[in-house]
Image (cartoon, rainbow, N blue to C red):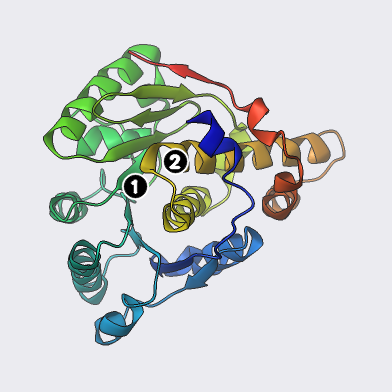
Amino acid sequence: MLREVAAAWPLKKAPLVQCITNEITCESLANALLYVDAKPVMADDIREFDEFFAQNDAVLLNLGHITDGKEQALQAAARYAAATGTPAVVDLVGVAATRLRYDLAWQLWESGPQVIKGNLSEMRRFCGLPSAARGVDGNAADQEAAALAELAAAMQEICRRRPLLLLATGPQDLVVTANCSLKLANGVPQLDRFTGTGDIVGSLIAALLGEGLAPLPATVAAVSYFNLCGEAAAAVVTGKGQGLATFRQETLDRLSLLMEDKQWWQKICGEEFL
């Protein structure tokens, strides 16, 4: 797997990623994909799906900012992805906050996406565990060692029910399949303090799936790459009296720069879990 992770960036095929996503972070996702040489299309009108699913390479289904129309678009896109064999990533934004999002998440699971992601608190709710989430944010109580072990076991049970990969993001990220459980430890706390970081990770996973990577190397490469961009940005900003807006811009800058280091993947910190 490390060979595939190491070769993930830069992208070679310019995969077209159709994003059905949160309007608040739509611009950030579109630019993040362009920075890594993918091609975004923010197309969520069901009337266009026949034509877009004939040409896209992957689809991101993000539960942020749910409306009646957005719910229908997500459900329709999941059906199209299943029918056309299009790799799909589901992002569980706010699934711990309302029953509507929780039910929708499980409806999308039924369609057979390749990857489902959320923060640690959202993933606990999705897996049927108690969650201390508030709104769309994770909670420190869900990030303790015992809670991580409990969550990883629950994630693995879900993966054994239907082939897919589950990703829970936080200070330590859990990447779980039916046969594999990894804990990744890159990143900096500042990444939790500007909006859209989780959404960007979902779009990067979709881009790598569209490039042809399998779910496990695609997810490890996307999460680790973005977290390392955050680490590099923090190193620039720290001690210079610069704030979070500068850190955000530096992180986004690194999306196009880090891949120039052919050994970037050697900075990945992770281990098998469970």
Instruction: Answer above or below: position of 116 versus 176.
Output: below
Instruction: Answer above or below: position of 69 versus 143.
Output: below
Q: Which mark is residue 165?
A: none
Q: Which mark is residue 219?
A: 2
Q: Secondary structure at mark 1?
A: loop
Residue at (65% x, 36% y) in the render: 228
Asked if residue 247 can be seen in this view, the reply is no
Asked if residue 71 can be seen in this view, the reply is yes
Answer few, some or many: residues within 10 Å of disc 2's Cα (few below 14, many 20 plus, some between 14 and 19): many
Residue at (32% x, 57% y) in the render: 87
Q: Is residue 217 left or right of residue 36?
A: left
Answer few, some or many: residues within 10 Å of disc 1's Cα (few below 14, many 20 plus, some between 14 and 19): few
The residue where tag 1 is placed is: 135
Quote the CA–CA distance across marks 1 and 2. 25 Å
- Kind of residue indicated by mark 1: Gly
- Kind of residue indicated by mark 2: Thr
Q: Is residue 79 left or right of residue 148?
A: left
Instruction: Answer above or below: position of 32 versus 147.
Output: below
- Residue situated in front as seen by the camera: 155 or 162: 162
Q: Position of residue 233 (x, y in %)?
A: 74, 42
Q: Upstream in the sequence, badge 1 or badge 2?
A: 1
Q: Position of residue 108 (x, y in %)?
A: 19, 55
Q: Quadrant of residue 68?
A: bottom left
Q: Position of residue 243 (x, y in %)?
A: 75, 46
Residue at (24% x, 20% y) in the render: 153
- Residue situated in front as seen by the camera: 221 or 211: 211
**Which residue is situated farthest in the right direction here?**
240
Q: Is residue 163 left or right of residue 6?
A: left
